[in-house]
Amino acid sequence: MNLLSSKYNIKNVGKAIYPVLILLLSIVAINCSNDIDENTEFITIGTFNIAWLGDGINDNNPRVDNDYKIIAEVISNSYADIIGLEEIENEAALGKLTKYLDNFSFFVGNESGEQNPAILFRNNIHLTQLRYVHELEVEPNKTKPGILFEVRKGNFDWLMMVVHFKSTSRYDSTDELQDLSRQLRRKQAAALSLWVDSVLNTSNEKDIIIVGDFNDYPGRKSEATLTNLVENKNIEFLTNDMKSCKYDYLYSIDHIIISQSVKERYLSNSVRMYNFFDALTEADAEKVSDHCPVFATFNISIKDND
């Protein structure tokens, strides 16, 4: 039995709920009526922080096999094609998840302790890991590098980076530590903005997609940390107004950023959050993550522009 097929909630950043639901239902209908691996018109790209996904050995967030199966069903029911992941311990951890997913491959970083960025992608997608983006590691042992990939499907090829910015958490127990975490996140945002500009100014590649956990939201007014990215005219947050799934009075900190040339491929109003908290028991949902996956859909049939 599909644990998530009965109901789910999609959070919308469009202007109206009804048109988006119609759009998403049409996307699902397309995917259900055809083999999703053979879809030649669209690709769905996302990000998902799976909260300390471990390998079963002394895990910070212990899980049993059924928990991995439920996480796999969350991913399967999202109809995602390629997903940046955060907080993955190692290859063994992701292997425990992908045994419940057909026709997927993955890459896991190994430079960030027990909380590595990773990427999960369908086998019909051509992906090459280019490098760790150490420019984002603005302070060793406190910040994580991004991971950069070259990706292609259909007529669309692009650079895709998975990031996990410095958090401000309960471990920042003093005002000084909280301020330091914000300073580090500002430095990461500035470094990422400079990286984007450098790529666009010095290479022929104009298509960039950045996904991940930014530990802040672009609309913050007080003590903002993502300002350099928000003010960079070369890129845009698709997730600018998205709310958190677990705490709907807060804004989401999981984001999809695109360069301006990718915008022509973006399927209007397709950015969404899969709220599995509405589909699972509280106990099961807590074992999935305290984040919900975020996705957007893009046209890959348009002629490549670079």
Image: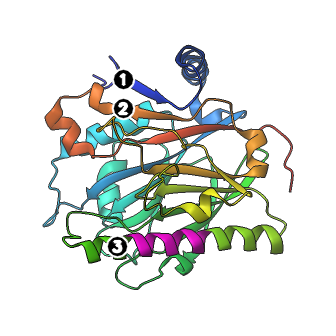
Answer yes or no: is residue 225 visible: yes
Q: Point out the tag, 1 or 2, that comes first from the N-terminus.
A: 1
Q: Residues within 10 Å of mark 1 (few under 14, many from 20)?
A: some
Q: Is residue 273 left or right of residue 195?
A: left
Cα distance, mark 1 to mark 3?
37 Å
**Which mark is drawn over residue 179?**
3
In the picture of the structure, the residue carrying the numbered disc 2 is 275
Look at discs 1 and 3 and give the one toward the viewer.
3
Look at discs 2 and 3 and give the one toward the viewer.
3
Residues rendered magenta in the picture: 182-192
Answer yes or no: is residue 3 visible: no
Cα distance, mark 2 to mark 3?
31 Å
The residue depicted at 37 percent of the width and 40 percent of the height is 244
Tell me residue 201's x, y (percent).
82, 71
**What SS does tag 3 mark?**
helix
The residue depicted at 48 percent of the width and 75 percent of the height is 145
Task: Decide whether residue 291 is among the magenta residues.
Answer: no
Asked if labels 2 and 1 touch by Cβ distance under 8 angstroms, the answer is yes
Q: Is residue 146 left or right of residue 305?
A: left
The residue depicted at 28 percent of the width and 55 percent of the height is 51
Cα distance, mark 1 to mark 2?
6 Å
